Image (spheres, helix red, strand yellow):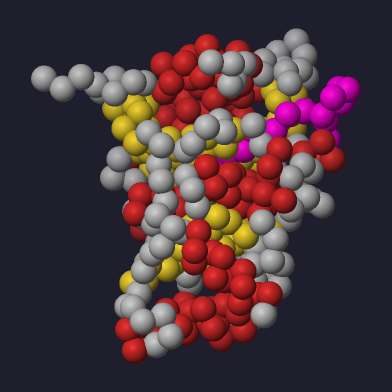
Amino acid sequence: MTSSPPSLAHFLRERQRAGRIDTDLRLLLETCARACKTISAHVNRGALAGVLGAAGTVNVQAEEQKKLDVVSNDILIEANARSGSLAALASEEMERPLSVAPPKGGGPYLLVFDPLDGSSNIDVNVPVGTIFSVLRCPEGVREPDERAFLQPGRAQVAAGFAVYGPATMFVLTVGDGAHGFTLDAQRGSFMLTHPQLRIPPDTAEFAINMSNQRRWEPPVRRYIDECLAGKEGPRGKDFNMRWIASMVADVYRVLSRGGVFLYPSDSRYPQGRLRLMYEAMPMALIVEQAGGAATDGRTRLLDIVPSALHQRVPVVLGSRHEVERLATYHAD
Ligand code: F6P
């Protein structure tokens, strides 16, 4: 009989014992994982849970909200508003942060999340997920507003995401590597099945929405053209393409077998399409912790200081040598 891998709870207790995280952060991460399990249950039941389809509302980015966007947001708020570890939380689905006041809240951390990433995929049964980032509440700030959140990605103390796919996976970093946990539905626990994920520096696989090709800037056009030219082109090798249109699933693939993921700026989204604080920043930390790289084309994503909670940013992340190549093309 094979022994089962350690649980997330065990992993976090070990990290606390080693002095890497404190009790508040451990409890906060356990709460986020628990919320992801609840969201996973809703996603799994699909139409049976009555959660498919549009909610009939739009979010702060004027995007149509799906019922499951709203349900997932409520689950995360409900779980965290009582956790005692947070000073405030912010979400893709809410215009402004929500302060979590004492006596229940008033903790040392800020949480920012995308409750249901890739939600356009829910109704067609393609993986979706949850992304989150944890920051420290700035010293002396009692009632944190948006400004408290505007910290660069390198200030994150933890970041993670869940993918609700064939298996529900939870990927986490607390700054000592990126680790993957599989939900064991029978135990109701995330188990450490993929410790120390590593992204190989080289790859022959890219992920981009090719339908935007005519809108890209020259460096991205050049990079993709060269990949498409395959063995006969300047790269001298054939490339494969994948695009799931769920960042969580695309990034999980990159963490599993390498690759480069791009959502560049284009003439429709000159600032980029993905959100800096609850998509790009947490994914960049996880990817770097797994040995990969992440840039907006010119600047390391983790060095960008946000100017707004819902700011967008171009994203190139994954296998280090490919990301560096793209940065060189931008510099050229
Ligand atoms: O930001 C939401 C998101 O669904 C990402 O998860 C995904 O990478 C991207 O948008 C898909 O964009 P498109 O619809 O252009 O393929």
In this rendering, the answer to whether 146 lies above or below 3 is below
Left or right: 106 in relation to 167: right
Main SS, magenta residues: loop
In the depicted view, which residue is nearer to us: 160 or 234? 234
Residue at image x 34%, y 54%?
A: 257
Q: Position of residue 303 (x, y in %)?
A: 72, 51
Residue at image x 29%, y 20%?
A: 187
Q: Where is residue 44 in the image (x, y as percent from the top left)?
A: 33, 40
- Specify the segment rendered in magenta: 131-145
Look at the image and tell me in which quarter the C terminus lies. bottom right
Q: Position of residue 321 (x, y in %)?
A: 49, 64
Residue at image x 56%, y 19%?
A: 26
Residue at image x 35%, y 49%?
A: 256
In this rendering, the answer to whether 55 lies above or below 214 is above
Is residue 140 in the magenta section? Answer: yes
In this rendering, the answer to whether 87 lies above or below 303 is above
Taking the view exactly as shown, the residue that stands out farthest to the bottom is 232
Left or right: 218 in relation to 40: right
Look at the image and tell me in which quarter the N terminus lies. top left
Would residue 211 be visible to someone looking at this image?
no
